[in-house]
Image (cartoon, rainbow, N blue to C red):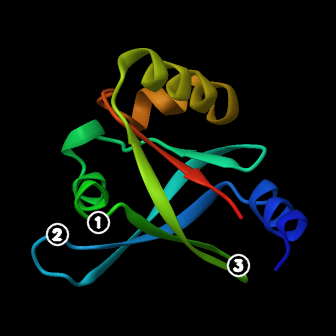
């Protein structure tokens, strides 16, 4: 899948399925997440911030697999913890998913994850 097809697939999706490797069990764990795409950058926001298990697993491995429809990519994950950068990601989520839904589903705003698409 070329980069334009990747972007089209993501633009047609509200959420992704992410798969991470457990930091203790070394087993794969998958969960659906919301995301925001800006160009070739994806932002993920853990619903419980740095306490989220998938986020803790990403910190250990720095790898994450994303999938949506026929799209499946193994990517390098860059945690974001600097408060201004996290706030910027939160603002992007509010614009895409709505202020009320972000308030309803997200309880902590101390961490985010950045992914670069191929």
**Residue at image location 42% in from the left, 32% down from the top:** 104
Disc 1, disc 2: CB below 8 Å?
Answer: yes
Q: What crowding class fits label 3: few (fewer than 14 Cα within 10 Å), some (14-19), or many (20 or more)?
A: few
Name, please, the residue furthest toward the top.
84
- First along the sequence among labels 1 and 3: 1
How far is mark 2 from mark 3, CA to CA? 27 Å
How far is mark 1 from mark 2, CA to CA? 7 Å
**Residue at image location 34% in from the left, 34% down from the top:** 111
Tell me, for residue 105, which label it has, or none: none
Q: What crowding class fits label 1: few (fewer than 14 Cα within 10 Å), some (14-19), or many (20 or more)?
A: some
User: Where the C terminus falls, by quadrant?
Assistant: bottom right
Disc 2, disc 3: CB below 8 Å?
Answer: no
How far is mark 1 from mark 3, CA to CA? 25 Å
Numbered disc in front, either 2 or 3: 2
Q: Is residue 43 above or below residue 83?
A: below
Residue 40 percent coordinates (x, y): 74, 50
Find disc 3 in the rendering and name its residue.
69
- Exactly how many numbered labels are in the figure? 3
Residue 37 percent coordinates (x, y): 70, 45
**Left or right placement of residue 100 versus residue 47 in this view:** right
Q: Between residues 42 and 100, which one lies in front from this camera angle?
A: 42
Name, please, the residue furthest toward the left.
24
Secondary structure type for disc 1 = helix
Residue 107 percent coordinates (x, y): 30, 31
Q: Is residue 5 above or below residue 59?
A: below
Find disc 1 in the rendering and name its residue.
61
Find disc 2 in the rendering and name its residue.
23
Secondary structure type for disc 2 = loop
Residue 72 percent coordinates (x, y): 63, 79
Numbered disc in front, either 1 or 3: 1
Q: Between residues 112 and 100, which one lies in front from this camera angle?
A: 112
Residue 77 picture quarter:
bottom left
């Amino acid at each position: 899948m070329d980069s334009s097809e990747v972007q089209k697939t993501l633009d047609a999706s509200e959420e992704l399925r992410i798969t991470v490797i457990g930091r203790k069990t070394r087993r794969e764990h998958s969960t659906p997440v919301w995301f925001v795409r800006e160009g070739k950058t994806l932002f993920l926001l853990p619903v419980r911030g740095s306490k989220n298990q998938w986020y803790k697993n990403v910190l250990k491995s720095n790898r994450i697999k994303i999938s949506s429809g026929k799209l499946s990519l193994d990517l390098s994950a860059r945690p974001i913890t600097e408060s201004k950068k996290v706030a910027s990601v939160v603002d992007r989520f509010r614009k895409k998913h709505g202020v009320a839904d972000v308030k309803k589903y997200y309880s902590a705003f101390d961490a985010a994850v950045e992914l670069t698409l191929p």
